[in-house]
Image (tube, grey):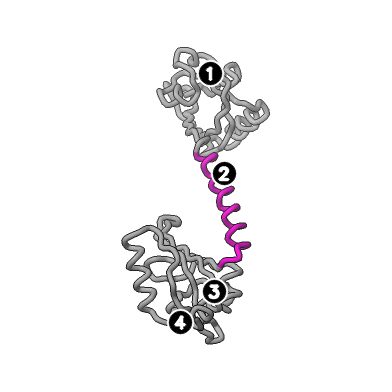
Amino acid sequence: ITRASDQRFVAVNAAFERVSGYAAQEVIGRTAQELRLFADEQERQALFARIRHDGSLRDVRVQLRRKDGALRIVEFSFEPIDIDGEPHRLSQSRDVTEAIEANRHLQESLRKFASVFETSPEAIAVARVSDGTHLEVNGAWSRLIGHTREYAVGRSALEMKIWVDPAERARLLDELERAERVSNFNARFRRADGTVIDVLLSCERVELQGEPCLVHGWRDVSEQKRRERAL
């Protein structure tokens, strides 16, 4: 809590002490500017200009300098309050540094995954466990099976009659109930033009945004199977 007239702290709680690294007695009676809490002075000035203009702010992200010099990203909220007839400001801050960093790493991982996913020569599809609906397929999948991505996404393999024998799919799902991953599973797929191909399939259970999904990777081994049958 700060006085509106001179922006000096009159009270801070334990959470503020944890975020800033300062003990309450080091803060009360001083201003954020004196403590150099804001890493960017221009950002501080702009923030307080908005407070004076708008009266209150919600979830404004700024960079805070802790007592030990470490920089943290926090979300500030400000509300005007009245204490004994004198205007004050109640500020709440939440350290979001780790959340932002985790999200950055996640986005980098997703970009790398997207690049590998799309450029892989192996056909890859992602489908929901609950109904088998395709959430994504890569270019190799479209080329090998003959269905476009636009047609496949939102439809299940059963709807598209890709599995020549649905019992094979049931057997795959049964194996996945006992293990997170199944490798080198032999199956027969039907291409968009009706051609039946032999495939060697690997499948893994993953969770995407809380939804159980399956990632299938497979390759056409029809020629290999024909040679084996010819022997």
Identify the mark at residue 161; answer none if there is no mark: 4
Which mark sits nearer the N-terminus, 1 or 2? 1
| Relative to 70, residue 165 above or below | below
Q: Main secondary structure of the magenta part?
A: helix
Residue density around tag 3, few if under 14, some if 14–19, many if 20 or more, within 10 Å = some
Mark 3 vs mark 2: give the one in front: 3
Residue density around tag 2, few if under 14, some if 14–19, many if 20 or more, within 10 Å = few
User: Which of 104/81 is in front?
Assistant: 104
**Is-magenta flag for residue 157?**
no
Residue density around tag 4, few if under 14, some if 14–19, many if 20 or more, within 10 Å = some
Position of residue 38 measured from the top left corner of the image (x, y, whole percent): 60, 25
Q: Residue at x 53, y 24 (%)?
A: 4
Q: Residue at x 57, y 17 (%)?
A: 35
Identify the mark at residue 104; answer none if there is no mark: 2
Assign a secondary structure to mark 1.
loop
Which mark sits nearer the N-terminus, 4 or 2? 2
Q: Are marks 3 and 1 in contact (CB under 8 Å)?
A: no
Position of residue 214 measured from the top left corner of the image (x, y, whole percent): 43, 63
Identify the mark at residue 194; answer none if there is no mark: none
Q: Quadrant of residue 143?
A: bottom right
Mark 3 vs mark 1: give the one in front: 3
| Residue type of the residue flagged with mark 3 | Asp
Instruction: Give how far apart the Cα atoms at labels 4 and 3 are.
Output: 17 Å
Q: Residue at x 53, y 74 (%)?
A: 221
Identify the mark at residue 220; answer none if there is no mark: 3
Position of residue 166 measured from the top left corner of the image (x, y, whole percent): 38, 79
Q: Quadrant of residue 12?
A: top left
Which mark sits nearer the N-terminus, 3 or 1? 1
| Residue type of the residue flagged with mark 1 | Arg
